[in-house]
Image (tube, rainbow, N blue to C red):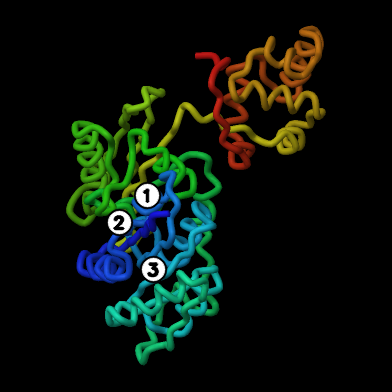
Amino acid sequence: MKTTFVVADDHPLVLEGVKGVLRAMDPDADILQATSYPDLLNVLSEDLDFSLVIADLNMPGMAGLDGIRAVQLKRPEVPMVIISATESQKAINKTLECGVAGYMFKSFSQQQMQDALEAVLQGETFVPQPGAQMFSSDEFEDKKKPDFGAAALNRLPMGVVIVDKGANVVFMNNAASDIFALNDGVDVGPSGVFRTAKVAETKMLHSMIADAAVDLGRANEEDREGGALTVSRPSYRRSFSLLVVPLPDEDVTSDSGNVAVFINDPEKHNEPPTNVLARLYGLTEAEARLLQALIVGKKLETVSEEFGVSMNTVRSHLKQVFRKTGTNRQPELVSLVMNSSAYLASNPVQVEDDYED
């Protein structure tokens, strides 16, 4: 079976250096490359038997341990080796605790890299001796302050991407990562830039981002407009809708980006758990199941068939749901739930048909 390696690093010299080591180890191997974590996740979405992933610790899109976790979630069966300029014991320990198969320094010679990679391919864990430089990085502090903002964004069922004025991705939530993995109209290019499948749409998106990123020190706040954009999909599914929103300068650092892009996939319907709906509105289990079905666009006839109950029973449950939620019509009912805290507990589901326009 042919060997397939993946190398990910946003520094061209390091990228080519590692690829050179791999070619020396196996001249016939396929070597795929990436220059950002979103790009790497797209590569790993391919239906290939990867032998090894070698990735920089910090790249555009994600940083540190978050990138490692995303890769392992995508392809847990593939061993991963980290390559980093950070030579501290804390960095080594933290990455190994995440389950990586090895850790290499960028200061390694080609022979040292080859020895490390061969050890990993033989099923060993490669652990280097820490260097003299002990970088002080918040990522590896023993008492690291929890990133509650990122954790909260990851609970949202819609995609959230934070970019700088050049549309470089500096953060994405879990939903956005799933959308990019579809490779269906929006993605992150090799250099870490947020783009679309069409040049004209990409230009419009980048223009909105640049407009929203105007420095408040040089412009009025009302000049930071952002905008909304519909992005077509090669699959011909319904278009993504993007909302570009400026973030207050005081909430971000100069190198963290100050524009948020919200991505909605109309093909995904968010389905709040029935227990959450029941508790919020005092519903019975049957009423909560009905409400859950209506939220994802199912018709009453379909609910009757799937639940194995008569239409009279379904209509009776619906009347009770209307009464308990203080609504009178189905659109009003769905809007109520989608604007409630139940939305944060939603699970995205694909609904191929039977939704109402």
State the image quarter where residue 59 is shown: bottom left
Helix or strand or loop: what does disc 1 sit on?
helix
The local crowd at label 2, few if under 14, some if 14 to 19, many if 20 or more residues have their Cα within 10 Å, is many
SS type, badge 2: strand
Q: Nearer the viewer, residue 261 or 173?
A: 173
Q: Residue at x 37, y 56 (%)?
A: 4
Q: Is residue 309 above or below residue 60?
A: above
User: Dot 3: what SS?
Assistant: loop
Res 340 → quadrant: top right
Residue 348 vs residue 11, the one in the foreground: 11
Say which residue label 3 marks: 57
With 343 as the anchor, is 284 left or right in this view?
right
**Is residue 126 visible from the viewing direction of this image?**
yes
Q: Amino acid at mark 1?
A: Val
The residue beneath circle 1 is: 43
The answer to whether residue 254 is seen in the rendering is no
Report, in whole angstroms, how far the alpha carbon at label 3 lies from the one at label 2: 15 Å
Label 2 near label 3: C-beta < 8 Å? no
Dot 1, how many residues are within 10 Å of its Cα: few (below 14), some (14-19), or many (20+)?
some
Q: CA distance from mark 1 to mark 2?
A: 8 Å
How busy is the neighbourhood of tag 3: few (under 14 within 10 Å), some, or many (20 plus)?
A: many
Amino acid beneath label 3? Leu
Q: Amino acid at mark 2?
A: Gln
Residue named by callout 2? 33
Dot 3 or dot 2: first in sequence order is: 2
